[in-house]
Image (spheres, rainbow, N blue to C red):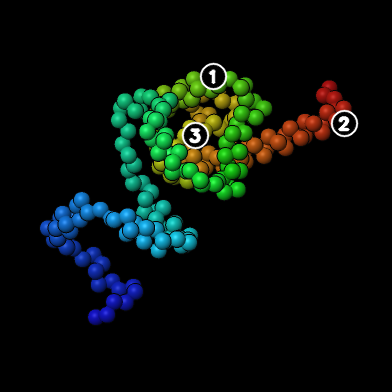
Amino acid sequence: MPFKKGHKINLGRKFPKSFGEKISRSKKGVKFTKNHIEALRKSRLGFKMPEETKKKISLALKGRPGRKWTAEERARPGRKWTKKSKEKMRKARLGKKHSEETKKKIGAANSREKHWNWKGDEVGYDALHRWVYKEKGRPVSCEHCGESKRLEWSNISGDYKRDARDYEALCVKCHHVKDGVYEKMWITRRKNVKRREDKSYKIR
Ligand SMILES: [Zn+2]
């Protein structure tokens, strides 16, 4: 039978366990040559994954356990990257430029410091950050999109209260988006305050 897209002849078909083991053994330690890697890279160049496929992959990955943190790692919320991994990250980004969208997101994340309620007290923020992790532990999944990686506790009210209910788990992506939305809100508020001052608005 010739191969036809959509064939379901292999669906649910079980291969003997030894079959998988044999393949696994034969592939163990096999490394791609540099040429091969380059050829693979070139063949993928300019290829954009359809949104539909991305969604499918995302769905399939959801709820899959990520890397397990050791107890020691969990106990150090303020842990630092090692020099080696920092250097690795630096090299990976070398010569790459952020897209306009990414730049906007980074700007939004940094705008936390420009927030009118921001005391500019880095020590206070760090302590609060540690406090939230101690209080609530490590976030498990993004309360907005369900993502299970790169999670942070995000302040809800913007008042950075010492109240565990004032923090929600968000992935880095949703956190940045949220900060962007809040920043816009704050700009509008500040504008309104200015407008009132300009009209010598008086509060009785
Ligand atoms: Zn999210």
Q: Position of residue 179 (x, y in %)?
A: 59, 37
Q: Is residue 182 above or below residue 80?
A: below
Q: Residue at x 43, y 43 (%)?
A: 92
Q: Residue at x 44, y 56 (%)?
A: 55
Residue 204 seen from this side: yes
- Discs 2, 3 touching: Cβ within 8 Å: no
Q: Is residue 100 left or right of residue 191?
A: left
Residue sitting at the far right? 199
Using the rendered view, name the quadrant where residue 81 is placed.
top left
Q: Earlier in the sequence, mark 2 or mark 1?
A: 1
Q: Residue at x 38, y 49 (%)?
A: 62
Residue that mark 2 sits on? 199
Q: Position of residue 13 (x, y in %)?
A: 21, 66
Using the rendered view, name the quadrant where residue 185 is placed.
top right
Q: Position of residue 102 (x, y in %)?
A: 56, 45
Residue that mark 1 sits on? 124
**CA distance separating discs 2 and 1:** 37 Å
| Secondary structure category for the residue under label 1 | helix
| Secondary structure category for the residue under label 2 | loop
Q: Earlier in the sequence, mark 2 or mark 3?
A: 3
> At label 2, which amino acid type do we have?
Lys
**CA distance separating discs 2 and 3:** 39 Å
Is disc 2 surrounded by few (<14), some (14 to 19) or many (20+) residues within 10 Å?
Answer: few
Considering the image in quadrants, where does the N terminus appear?
bottom left
Residue that mark 3 sits on? 168
Q: Is residue 154 above or below residue 26?
A: above
> At label 3, which amino acid type do we have?
Glu
Q: Earlier in the sequence, mark 1 or mark 3?
A: 1
